[in-house]
Image (cartoon, grey):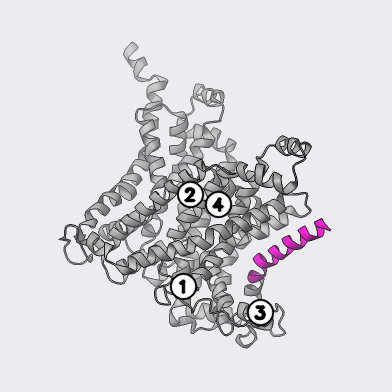
């Protein structure tokens, strides 16, 4: 009797159910995370076009990668993107969030409108901006030439194309960051501002001394998410420029895609993916460290 | 005065974010010759762009495919995700801590590393060009598991104990007791999953070449960059509008949920 009781104990029942509950995930993890991860390590050392058998080539993929100008080009392009995208996004998002956080009618309406591009597919946004950016007939250039500035070679000039994509990506994503900053702003304790105004601190001083330091966790999130976004850029250059002109908008993921599905270089594409993933993890860790420890003055 | 400046800035922002969409929708209803101006109005509104898009590409089928893929992914993510979340939060079993660590590790793993091997897995299983390949990698997400776990941890133990004493199975407890108490997180995960699945382009481009299986964003993308649109602006805008419309309609109904979902996701993520 006692042994039977023990067998049916709640604890035992729980642990059995626990295993049943996580079983689907274990299968999923094995198939779609663990196996691909292991297989990616295998691919690193092979040449393979899916059709013919794999060929062991040692470290050749890495040798090739470190002498591949397009690999470095993709990194430089991504850095260029981030250099515009991150600061622009922070300024616009924080500015609009501060406005939304003040006493306001129709706050819900403005919030909803700013967030609209976030929910819409990147494909839609890209098709739309293709029209805005068109050199001869684009709306932006029509507007600019109407006010006498003249046409801007948004997507034609290799020096500009990536910046144009960064601008577009900011327009698409800034809504998320407005909301994140808004949540951050609401978390700043009221008393801080009250005691600061009693001490005679101006609004501007309060903003730089209280608001900005208190928003540091939000800044970390914004920087990290934007960085991951930059390295994940695909649809935008794929539709807008195909990576051109002169590879100036070749992004990390677009390059992996091209190597894998145009040239069937699976081993090399996996190597690129692996190295880009390491770079992402490295950059994100570094950013966290810098933003979390740097003292603000 | 200050208030005026504030509303002016916000109003300008609203125009910058909303006007392009209005322009897209109205332009898609204009004949090719009329598109190009800033204005929204036209004297010859027509549906001919839409008629032509449907003639050239199987957009109806693509819509259906997208619905099938997004819905199955969403249902799977909330059912299995909440089961794992519940086990991690409320059930005692050996290896629970390790499993949680694995889930967190999976969430931080950049997709760039698994993209190619996942594709090869589809090839090896012989399931490229199937619905299964489209949904398989998104049937469960580490992120949803973590959201569920965080939420379930705060549900009072007394409720679970009471249900257990009544003889409820754990599965019943999860879906009959926990779920009704967890509407916010269930809605959050559903919306985020549905939205990201609906908008996904890269994965369908990789695993599906058969036109009748393509999802809507995929088909519209290929339509735009391929020759089929013949650089006719009206057609591209009509296709883009059709792609955007379901999400915009859903957004107008569940706007609050969308925004709050993203906020909670961003903070926890």
Residue B150 drawn above or below residue A253: above
**Chain at numbered mark 3:** A
The x, y position of residue A170, in whole percent, is 56, 62
Query: Disc 2 vs disc 4: which is toward the camera?
Result: 4
Asked if badges 4 and 1 are on one and the same chain, I answer no
Q: Where does label 1 land, which residue?
A: A239
Which of the marked residues, 2 or 4, is nearer the chain's N terminus? 2
**Chain at numbered mark 1:** A
Query: Disc 1 vs disc 2: which is toward the camera?
Result: 1
Say which quarter of the image contains residue A54. Answer: bottom left
Secondary structure at badge 4 equals helix
Q: Where does label 4 land, which residue?
A: B191
Whether label 1 touches label 2, CB < 8 Å? no
Residue B62 drawn above or below residue B252: below
The x, y position of residue B108, in whole percent, is 41, 46
Say which quadrant the C terminus of chain A sits in: top right
Query: Disc 2 vs disc 3: which is toward the camera?
Result: 3
Q: Where does label 2 land, which residue?
A: B75
In-front residue for pair B62/A138: A138
> Which residues fall within the magenta stretch?
B1-21
| Residue closest to the far bottom | B33
């Amino acid at each position: 009797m006692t042994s039977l009781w023990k067998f049916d104990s709640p604890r035992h029942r729980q642990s059995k159910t626990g295993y049943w509950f996580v079983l689907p995930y274990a299968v999923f993890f094995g198939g779609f995370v663990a196996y691909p991860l292991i297989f990616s390590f295998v691919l690193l050392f092979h040449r393979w076009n899916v059709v013919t058998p794999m060929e062991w080539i040692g470290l050749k993929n890495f040798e090739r990668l470190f002498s591949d100008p397009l690999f470095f080009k993709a990194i430089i392009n991504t850095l260029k993107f981030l250099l515009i995208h991150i600061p622009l996004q922070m300024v616009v998002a924080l500015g609009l969030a501060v406005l939304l956080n003040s006493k306001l009618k129709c706050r819900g309406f403005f919030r909803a409108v700013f967030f609209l591009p976030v929910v819409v597919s990147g494909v839609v946004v890209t098709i739309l901006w293709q029209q805005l950016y068109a050199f001869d007939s684009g709306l932006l250039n029509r507007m600019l030439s109407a006010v006498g500035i003249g046409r801007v070679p948004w997507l034609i000039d290799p020096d500009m194309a990536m910046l144009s994509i960064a601008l577009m990506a900011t327009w698409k994503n800034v809504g998320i960051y407005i909301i994140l900053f808004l949540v951050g702003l609401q978390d700043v304790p009221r008393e801080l501002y009250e005691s600061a105004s009693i001490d005679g601190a101006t609004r501007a001083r309060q903003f730089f001394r209280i608001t900005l330091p208190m928003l540091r966790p939000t800044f970390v999130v914004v920087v990290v998410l934007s960085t991951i976004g930059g390295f994940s850029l695909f649809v935008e250059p794929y539709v807008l420029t195909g990576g051109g002109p002169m590879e100036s908008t070749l992004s990390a993921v677009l390059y992996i895609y091209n190597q894998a599905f145009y040239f069937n270089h699976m081993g090399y594409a996996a190597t690129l993916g692996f190295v880009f993933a390491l770079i992402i993890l490295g950059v994100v860790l570094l950013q966290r460290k810098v933003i979390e420890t740097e003292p603000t003055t | 005065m200050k208030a005026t400046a504030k509303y002016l800035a916000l109003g300008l922002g609203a125009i910058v974010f909303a006007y392009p969409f209005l322009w897209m929708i109205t332009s898609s209803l204009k004949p090719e010759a009329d598109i190009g101006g800033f204005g929204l109005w036209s004297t010859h509104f027509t549906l001919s762009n839409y008629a032509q898009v449907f003639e050239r590409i199987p957009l109806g089928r693509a819509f259906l495919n997208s619905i099938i893929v997004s819905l199955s992914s969403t249902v799977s993510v909330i059912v299995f995700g909440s089961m794992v979340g519940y086990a991690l939060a409320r059930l005692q079993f050996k290896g629970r801590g390790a499993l949680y660590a694995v889930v967190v590790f999976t969430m931080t793993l950049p997709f760039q590393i698994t993209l190619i091997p996942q594709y090869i897995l589809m090839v090896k299983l012989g399931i490229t060009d199937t619905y299964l390949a489209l949904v398989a990698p998104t049937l469960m997400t580490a992120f949803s598991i973590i959201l569920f776990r965080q939420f379930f941890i705060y549900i009072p133990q007394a409720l679970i104990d009471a249900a257990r004493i009544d003889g409820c199975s754990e599965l019943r407890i999860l879906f009959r007791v926990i779920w009704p108490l967890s509407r916010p997180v269930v809605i959050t995960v559903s919306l985020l999953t549905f939205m990201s699945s609906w908008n996904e382009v890269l994965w369908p481009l990789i695993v599906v070449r058969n036109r009748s299986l393509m999802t809507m964003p995929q088909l519209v993308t290929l339509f735009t960059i391929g020759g089929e649109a013949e650089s006719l602006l009206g057609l591209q805008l009509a296709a883009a509008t059709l792609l955007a419309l379901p999400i915009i309609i859903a957004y107008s109904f569940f706007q609050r949920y969308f925004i709050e979902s993203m906020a909670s996701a961003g903070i926890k993520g």
